[in-house]
Image: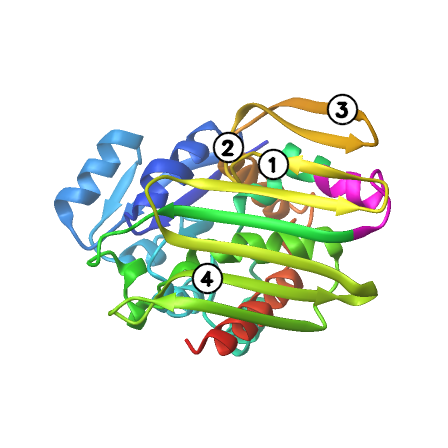
Amino acid sequence: MKKINWGVIGTANIAKEHTIPGMMQADNCNLYAIAGRNLEKVNEFKEKFGFQKAYCSYEELLDDEEIEAVYIPLANHVHKEWIIKAAKKKKHILCEKPMVPTPEETREVIKVCREEGVMLMEAFAYLHSDITKSVVDEVKHKTIGDIKLIEAVFFIPEIDKDNFRAKREFFGGSTYDVGCYNISLALRLLKEMPDRVDAMAHFTEGGIDDYSTVFMEFPNHIFVSTACGMCSTQRGDRYFIYGTEGRIEANIPYNADGLLSYQVIKDESIQEVQMEVLDNYRLEVEQFGRCIHGKETPFVENEFSLQVSKVIQMVLQKIGY
């Protein structure tokens, strides 16, 4: 299969530490170009990862006709701008989550991409993992009966106040940054929108929510309880699913590879489901590449991204963000 020429717009840590290494493993990806505002950093990325070209402006990268797809890992507040600019240059787009801050803007970027005939996918890499898909299948096939309650938690260490994720004007905060994982997981598992959302949060002096809790009620009286934050001394993410016939305990990071497992607990029996999992970011890029070649449709659908955005907005309204 012909490899797709990718351009990366920005030199954020998520790109450096996770997505680009995943792209290097992807069998249908060619790391063609990197763009950034800092010449030294751009050249560092070019040398480290083997990009063929380096640009000191995002516009120059988009003008390169050899580039078929772009990955956008920029700060949240400029995602919309560069999605639209990339779409108008006929580039397919993988954009880091949260794709855009509001449902209205989500609808706008989806509309532009459809009009321009390009694909757009939000980068929820963990949803491409085989272990996540396996848990989703357990719920779908009612391995633990009818779902009654889901608990999901995602905490990361406190971030520097100069980090863009700590700034309100950049749409920073724990709900946007890590709470979106908990929300997207609930929506993927239940495949419905909540009937009711409530939430509370603590705010920093800079005006962002550094930790919060969310409570949702879905149809058939299914409850979801989540917590997230940028306030821990170490990372912690896991989720538990409770059903009428048992429970699933997934003490696994959202984004992880290697040998992973979760437990299905029913009555007195404990079944450990174990599997070797490939890099989520690799799987994400490979899947999007197959979509570009017309072999599949995006696994993280635009409608799903819109649903996640709607719930995030409900949460933010409840906490007064």
Q: Nearer the viewer, mark 3 or mark 1?
A: 3
Q: Residues within 10 Å of mark 2 (few under 14, many from 20)?
A: some
* Residue 92 can be seen, yes or no: no
- Residue at 29 percent across and 58 percent down: it is 58
Residue at numbered disc 3: 271
User: Looking at the picture, which amino acid does disc 3 mark?
Assistant: Gln
Location of the C terminus (image quadrant): bottom left
Q: Are marks 3 and 4 in contact (CB under 8 Å)?
A: no
Between discs 2 and 4, the one toward the N terminus: 4
With respect to residue 124, does 249 lie above or below? above
Q: Which mark is residue 256?
A: 2
**Residue 171 at what x, y percent from top left?**
36, 68
Q: Are marks 2 and 4 in contact (CB under 8 Å)?
A: no
Distance between mark 1 and mark 2 Cα atoms = 9 Å
Q: Are marks 1 and 2 in contact (CB under 8 Å)?
A: yes
Left or right? Give the position of 27 relative to 64. Answer: right
Distance between mark 3 and mark 4 Cα atoms = 32 Å
Q: Nearer the viewer, mark 2 or mark 4?
A: 4
Residue 288 in magenta?
A: no
**Residue 89 at what x, y percent from top left?**
43, 63
Q: Are marks 3 and 1 in contact (CB under 8 Å)?
A: no
Report the span colored magenta. 135-147
Secondary structure state at the residue bearing disc 3: strand
Secondary structure state at the residue bearing disc 1: loop
Q: Nearer the viewer, mark 1 or mark 2?
A: 2
Looking at the picture, tell me which residue is in the foreground, 171 or 219. Answer: 219
State how the image is colored: rainbow
Residue at numbered disc 1: 129
Between discs 3 and 1, the one toward the N terminus: 1
Residue at numbered disc 4: 212
